[in-house]
Amino acid sequence: MANVLVNAPKTAKRGAIVEIKALILHPMETGFRPGPNGRIIPRNIIERFTASWNGVEIFDMEMSPAIAANPFVSFFAVATEGGTVELRWTGDEGFVVEERIAIAVE
Amino acid sequence: MMWPRVVLCLSAVFASSLGLAQVGGEGRHSGYRDMGEALQKMQDDDAANPGMLFVQLGRGLWGKAAGTSGKSCADCHGDAAGSMKGVAARYPAIPAGAEAPVDLEGRINLCRTANQGADRLPPESRELLALAAYVGHQSRGMAIAPPDDPRLAPLRTRGKELWTARQGQLNLSCAICHDDNAGKKLAGVTIPEAHPTGYPIYRLEWQTLGSLKRRLRNCLVGIRAEAYAFDAAEYVLLELFLMERARGMMLETPAVRP
């Protein structure tokens, strides 16, 4: 498992607004910096972050080289039904990380 | 008539500046107080503090076997929440059977070579920082309590000598900024009192976790002095002095700093 920290409420009232916070370990190498040997270090960033609630996409974010290492993303969603929130980060060098959290709605 | 009053005023000014100069006294505060509210919140929220990613990584390494012994840290030390509580608050120290003091990272490497039969982890490597952050995190909220080992006293004095010695092309000592001018501005940034309360720290400028050693090297380069080699004894001497200077202050590992 990649190193991810996700923080979201385990339970929510129906119709309530919940905040989902996600932090991931990633160098976010810009592709513009020269390395110790003077050559450009190849770009290695997360290109896309998406979140879906029971399979329905609720958040989509495109990332760029200007975003800092270990990006922290916080977003809000309306809890209409209980289920699984799937978070997915994809990027350069075949980087794919998926994380699932369960939120119960009462 | 007027003179006694002027003298009184002047002595009051002098006393207050003396109070500022003596950072090691009671008025000390962590660099946490010098940063903005947003960064303080970032450090306080375990889901937003990027240092916690490394703590989580360290927790994984703690239970992973390493070296020829096939043993993990947990096989000997058990649950770190109990066995490592307070350890970071008292290092650097002289381990049993050793002559020279080591800092927390040095102690981890000693355990690897002596007990696990593994290689030393390179300085500033992700694994070493993660283990140091995990061990350090177990002492969060505890007061810094350097050991009363009599062998350490002369070494602390040597650390203080390094702290107060002018060096580099700018001919500055650590003390000139962090004792005499702490709280004032250097290029728009508040000069901190330099208490090692949260190492390893997540520094936004580095975009990663870094040790106190890295921070000291940063300052040495800043005053245009030649940084000591990574395995130099000077770092441990300085750390010994700094931990004594910060005695009683609260550990924050992993701290966030700009």
Image (cartoon, coloured by chain):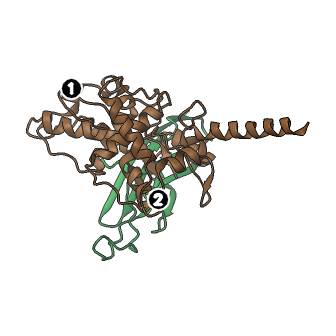
Chain colours: A green, B brown
Give the quadrant of residue B40.
top right
Q: Which residue is mark 2?
A: B171
Q: Which is nearer the eye, B49 or A13?
A: B49
On the image, the x and y values in percent for residue B175 come to 50, 46
- Determine whether, in the image, residue B54 is placed left or right of residue B15: left
Q: Position of residue B214 (x, y in %)?
A: 37, 52
Front disc: 2 or 1: 2
The residue marked by circle 1 belongs to what chain? B
Which quadrant: the N terminus of chain B? top right
Q: Secondary structure at mark 1?
A: loop
Disc 1 residue type (three-letter): Ala
Please state the total of marks drawn on the protein image. 2
Query: What residue is drawn where x is 47% and y is 29%?
Result: B247
Please tell me how crowded label 2 is: few (under 14), some (14-19), or many (20+) other residues with Cα within 10 Å: few
Q: Which residue is mark 1?
A: B96
Query: Mark 2 near mark 1, Cβ–Cβ under 8 Å?
Result: no
Tag 2 and tag 1 share a subunit? yes
Dot 1 alpha-carbon crowd within 10 angstroms: few under 14, some 14 to 19, many 20 or more: few
Q: Chain of mark 2?
A: B
Left/right placement of residue B208 relative to residue A105 reads left
Q: Is residue A85 visible?
A: no
First in sequence: mark 2 vs mark 1: 1
Q: Judge by depth and name the residue closer to the eye, B92 or B9.
A: B9
The relative height of residue A36 versus residue A78 in the rendered view (above or below) is: below
- Mark 2 lies on a secondary structure that is loop
Left or right of B199 on screen, residue B15: right
State which quadrant residue B227 falls in.
bottom left
Q: What residue is drawn where x is 52% and y is 53%?
A: B258
Name the amino acid, label 2. Asn
Residue depicted at 48% across the width and 33% down the height: B246
In three-dimensional space, the C-alpha distance between marks 2 and 1, rounded to whole angstroms, equals 39 Å
